[in-house]
């Protein structure tokens, strides 16, 4: 084991050296590498064939200029990214993020996580991610459309049903996927439905894809609760964010008998002891695209500008906003307030220190690459429907999603057991995700 740890340390040093300044990518790589010592001890062939080393190096990285015209006729400039990380299990698959914080290090951390997440689903999808530093806040529909068209005018040559299949992430939802698909169709003169997922229901989309990430995270949590002989009944839940993942996590928690008492956006958080009014939240966020204080005002709930939603006492915490939003201080407060479950709806929302504190305190903790895999899994179901020119019912698709989440949950626990860390979902997810993709890489030779 000491030898394995030294080998992994060396591999991590190489990641640091080859990717200077990309701190989020370093963080994501470190977490996975730290889990792999027992695997490397048992299976030295993964090191001998440089599988781990190759996994840490994207197969292809694309960076491009995205010029577009705003409503005043001024030319604006952004940068576009697509990191095609690993295609051993299937075409590159992963979302596009439009947020001013996007740079190569963020896209690489997300793409790296996506490899293991997609592997965990058991479906035939590789890992990739993309996006832009474009800030959609305050932009008109016309500006969003022109940006998406310019972005796709470069991206189209790199993607395809059998090559790379983008979807949404922060700042990219149904509206943006529509504009992106429209431009792809126009440039290529192909109605290639399987090139993007998250499409609208009348033009190749799948039932449940909109809800899938939030629903899936709550299905995963439900399995964690059942493992401990508990249920959502009477549980107080705090969700961060109020975007796609947060809204549908809230919906499923409420359907399963829990109460979501707080949610947030980057301007602050609301506390609504009666339970979040979903119809109002969807109207404020999805239709009006307004800030969260509008919800508080119209609902008569408390709005706290700035501040941390993790100050609100709860049984279950569901971080669904962004990376590193829940740090050691927040974890400490949650633990003191009696939180016993944390599931990451977002990608890497908990800092490594926070995760360590949860683990030491016996809080059941589900990492994002397992708990939020329902979104991409349902994207893979959308690809299946596109390939067969079929469309499935809501109930059937939701049952498939629920089975997939139960499968991921059980695989994490079984793998954690097998590798000497019983009950540890982080180790289980990293190792189970790694083994499937590593075996495919061994089979495919040195490519
Ligand atoms: P949305 O754009 O729909 O919503 C994001 C939410 O998080 C908003 O409420 C936003 O607030 C808040 N947020 C974003 N960035 C920050 C920030 N830097 N500081 C504070 N709040 C922030 O995105 P999604 O719901 O799709 O994504 C949320 C998370 O879930 C991301 O980590 C994403 O990678 C992950 N994820 C998404 C999947 C999907 O299918 N959509 C699948 C799996 C994971 P504001 O509007 O004020 O910026
Ligand atoms: O982080 C993620 O898994 C997503 N944003 C969804 C990716 C997808 O291809 O559906």
Image (cartoon, rainbow, N blue to C red):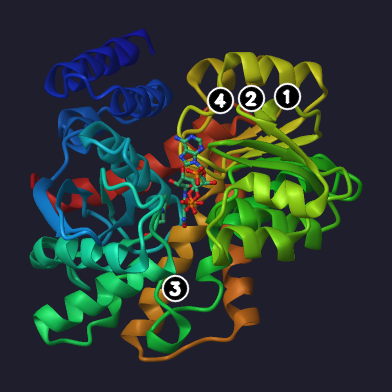
Which of the two discs, 2 and 3, sits closer to the camera?
A: 2
Q: Position of residue 109 (x, y in %)?
A: 31, 35
> Hey, which residue is sitting farthest bottom in the picture?
389
Q: Label 3: how many residues lie within 10 Å, few (<14), some (14-19) or many (20+)?
A: many
Instruction: Give the residue pinned by disc 4.
Output: 420
Query: Is label 2 in a helix, a strand or a loop?
Result: loop
Task: List the residue tagged with mark 2.
Answer: 307
Chain-order first, disc 4 or disc 3? 3
Depth-wise, is mark 4 or mark 1 nearer the camera? 1
Q: Point out the residue furthest to the front here.
A: 72
Q: CA distance from mark 4 to mark 3?
A: 33 Å
- In the picture of the structure, the residue carrying the numbered disc 1 is 311
Above/below status of 411 relative to 164: above
201 left or right of 53 in image: right
Horizontally, is 404 left or right of 49 in the view? right
Residue 168 image position (x, y, % from top left)? 38, 59
Q: Earlier in the sequence, mark 4 or mark 2?
A: 2
- Residue at 12% across / 87% down in the picture? 189
Q: Which residue is label 3 attached to? A: 381
**Res 344 visible:** yes
Choose between 122 and 396: the one closer to the eye: 396
Look at the picture and state if 20 lies above or below 100. above
Disc 2 and disc 3 in contact, CB within 8 angstroms: no
User: Are dots 1 and 2 in contact, CB under 8 Å?
Assistant: yes
Instruction: State which mark lies toward you, 4 or 3.
Output: 3
Number of numbered discs overlaid on the protein picture: 4
381 horizontally vs 33: left or right? right
Q: CA distance from mark 1 to mark 2?
A: 8 Å
Q: Is residue 291 above or below residue 160?
A: above
Mark 1 surroundings within 10 Å by alpha-carbon count, few (fewer than 14), some (14 through 19), many (20 or more): some
């Amino acid at each position: 084991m000491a030898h394995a740890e030294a080998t992994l340390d060396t591999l991590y040093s190489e990641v640091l050296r080859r990717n200077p300044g990309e701190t989020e990518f370093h963080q994501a790589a470190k977490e996975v590498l730290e889990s792999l010592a027992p695997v490397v001890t048992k299976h030295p062939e993964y090191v001998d064939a440089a599988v781990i080393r190759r996994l840490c190096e994207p197969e292809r990285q694309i960076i491009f200029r995205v010029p577009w015209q705003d409503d005043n006729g001024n030319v604006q400039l952004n940068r576009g990214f697509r990191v095609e990380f690993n295609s051993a299990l299937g075409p590159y698959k992963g979302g596009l993020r439009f947020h001013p914080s996007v740079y190569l290090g963020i896209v690489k951390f997300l793409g790296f996580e996506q490899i293991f997440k997609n592997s965990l689903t058991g479906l035939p999808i590789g890992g990739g991610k993309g996006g832009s530093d474009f800030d959609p806040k305050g932009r008109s529909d016309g500006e969003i459309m022109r940006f998406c068209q310019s972005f796709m005018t470069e991206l189209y040559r790199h993607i395809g049903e059998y090559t790379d299949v983008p979807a949404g992430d922060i700042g990219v939802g149904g509206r943006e996927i529509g504009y992106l698909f429209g431009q792809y169709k126009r440039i290529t003169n192909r109605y290639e439905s399987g090139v993007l997922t998250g499409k609208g229901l009348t033009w190749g989309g799948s039932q449940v894809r909109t809800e899938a990430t939030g629903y899936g995270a709550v299905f995963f949590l439900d399995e964690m609760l059942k493992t401990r002989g508990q249920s959502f009944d009477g549980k107080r839940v705090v969700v961060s964010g109020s975007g796609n993942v947060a809204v549908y996590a809230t919906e499923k928690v409420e359907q399963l008998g829990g109460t979501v008492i707080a949610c947030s956006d980057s301007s602050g958080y609301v506390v609504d002891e009666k339970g979040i009014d979903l119809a109002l939240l969807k109207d404020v966020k999805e239709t009006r695209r307004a800030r969260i204080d509008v919800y508080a005002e119209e609902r008569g709930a408390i709005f706290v500008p700035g501040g941390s939603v993790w100050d609100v006492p709860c049984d279950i915490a569901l971080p669904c906003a962004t990376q590193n939003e829940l740090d050691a201080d927040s974890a400490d407060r949650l633990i003191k307030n009696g939180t016993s479950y944390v599931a990451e709806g977002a990608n890497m929302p908990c800092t490594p220190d926070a995760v360590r504190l949860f683990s030491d305190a016996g809080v059941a903790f589900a990492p994002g690459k397992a708990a939020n895999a329902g979104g991409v899994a349902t994207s893979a179901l959308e690809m299946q429907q596109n390939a067969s020119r079929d469309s499935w019912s809501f109930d059937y698709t939701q049952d498939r999603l629920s089975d997939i989440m139960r499968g991921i949950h059980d695989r994490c626990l079984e793998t954690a057991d097998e590798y000497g860390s019983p009950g540890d979902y982080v180790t289980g997810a990293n190792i189970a995700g790694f083994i499937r993709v590593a075996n495919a890489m061994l089979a495919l030779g040195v490519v």
